[in-house]
Image: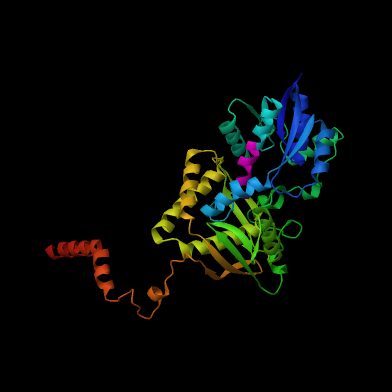
Amino acid sequence: MKKKIVLAYSGGLDTTVIIPWLKENYDCDIVAVCVDVGQEADWKTIKQRALDTGALSCYVADVKKEYVEEYVWPALKANAIYEDKYLLGTSTARPLIAKVLVDYARKENAVAIAHGATGKGNDQVRFDLGVLALAPDLEIIAPWRTWDLKSREDEIAYLEKRNIPVPMKKSDSYSRDDNLWHISHEGLDLEDPANEPTLEGMLKMTTAPEKAPDTAEYVEVEFEAGLPVAVNGKKMDGVSLIYELNKIGGKHGVGLVDLVENRVVGMKSRGVYETPGGAILYYAHSELEHLCLDRQTYVYKQGASQKMAELIYGGLWFTPLREAISAFVDSTQKNVTGTVRLKLFKGSITAAGAKSPYSLYNTSIASFETGELYNHADAKGFIRLYGLPVLVRALMEQGLKGKK
């Protein structure tokens, strides 16, 4: 009986090439595993493609619910944003995919896990670290790090030489990753940062802002303990909620990001990201935190948010530090409950009001009219003590000048 290799299979160009390549270079059976995190895919066709290309078997694991609840929501509650722009669409999915691959490797008694991440990308780090954390005994095979193929054109030629159908058009060979949270685009004209993205023909989920409706739309998002639970007054589960906001946000062209980012491996890369629903949720969640978090907690959480983003981006999901930050974040979210209203218009999101039973905004204190809880005269003593270091330094410098 041959040994087995579990392959992270998407049905795209890379993994379509990898099946015959593995069979040609390893004396093993290939078990293809498709992980459904909400990407647009014809799983029946993809499964058949894997079998036709030489896989022993092909499984489709629907983990959309787990993806949202166990990976997306922790990132959202943390306000984790990489390099001020990227909402971690690919990054949050990779540790879950690694977990699913390990689960199937155990079920199939496989000796190795293979993936199609390139030797220049971040995903190789995320997949490898996920497998190392959960199954250090399994071998990891990443063909892009060892084979002679140098480009997507080489891959297409590889398939054509073997009379294997190419699962894409040569003229549309952007490197894409999609799930229910986002779609990323890399390659082709995007490889030159001086080029403006050609949105027409590229975008899959989002309307180009200039072609969005000429009338603004308001959307309300309700949160309970930091988690979104309703859109426009309608309660729904996490998966349905994201799909609904993707539809609304995509219509108005929000959530488009063009980013030159720092990859884990040390180089810079350029990508265009579509995250319409995610952009709405991050904006709304942030507005609610401004209302419900005290100053010290908010400031400290900003640093934790940045670190959380770095850990997720760098593939360090299954680590004590990420778990500890998530525990801290959860404690900050107990009172982040309320409703946020946003205005969407031609690619922009603006706040249009927020309310919460836990709001720390107190009108009697904040109003320009003097209220019972605030005495203007108290400010003088506070400022004197608060600025004491400034005063002491100024006196010192004045004394030095007087001696000259």
The N terminus sits in image quarter: top right
Residue 269 makes an appearance in the image: no
Residue at (23, 63) in percent of width and height = 388
Tell me if residue 91 is in the magenta stretch. Answer: yes
Q: Residue 121, percent across and down?
A: 62, 41
Q: Nearer the viewer, residue 34 or 202?
A: 34
* Whether residue 214 is situated above or below residue 226 in the rendered picture: below
Please identify the quarter of the rendering in which residue 145 is found: top right
x and y, in percent, of residue 394 in the image: 21, 64
Q: Is residue 394 above or below residue 330?
A: below
Indicate how the structure is coloured in the image: rainbow
What segment is highlighted magenta in the picture?
Answer: 89-99
Of residue 281 and residue 199, the one placed in the foreground of this image is 281
* Up/down of 340 relative to 161, above or below: below
Q: How many circles with numbers are drawn on the protein?
A: 0
Question: Which residue is farthest left?
Answer: 403
Residue 204 percent coordinates (x, y)? 74, 56
Quadrant including the C terminus: bottom left
Judge from the rendering whether residue 303 lies leftward or rightward of residue 266; answer left or right: left
Q: Position of residue 286 (x, y in %)?
A: 52, 61
Q: Is residue 195 magenta?
A: no
Q: Hey, which residue is sitting farthest top in the picture?
A: 1
Q: To which quarter of the image does residue 110 belong?
A: top right
Work out which residue is located at the far right of the displayed protein and give it: 163
Instruction: Give the main secondary structure of the magenta stretch.
Output: helix
Image point 58% across, 28% down: which residue? 136
Picture layout, residue 42 above or below residue 274: above
Give me the residue at 71% from left, 33% from top: 7
User: In the picture provided, is 158 more to the left or to the right than 284?
Assistant: right
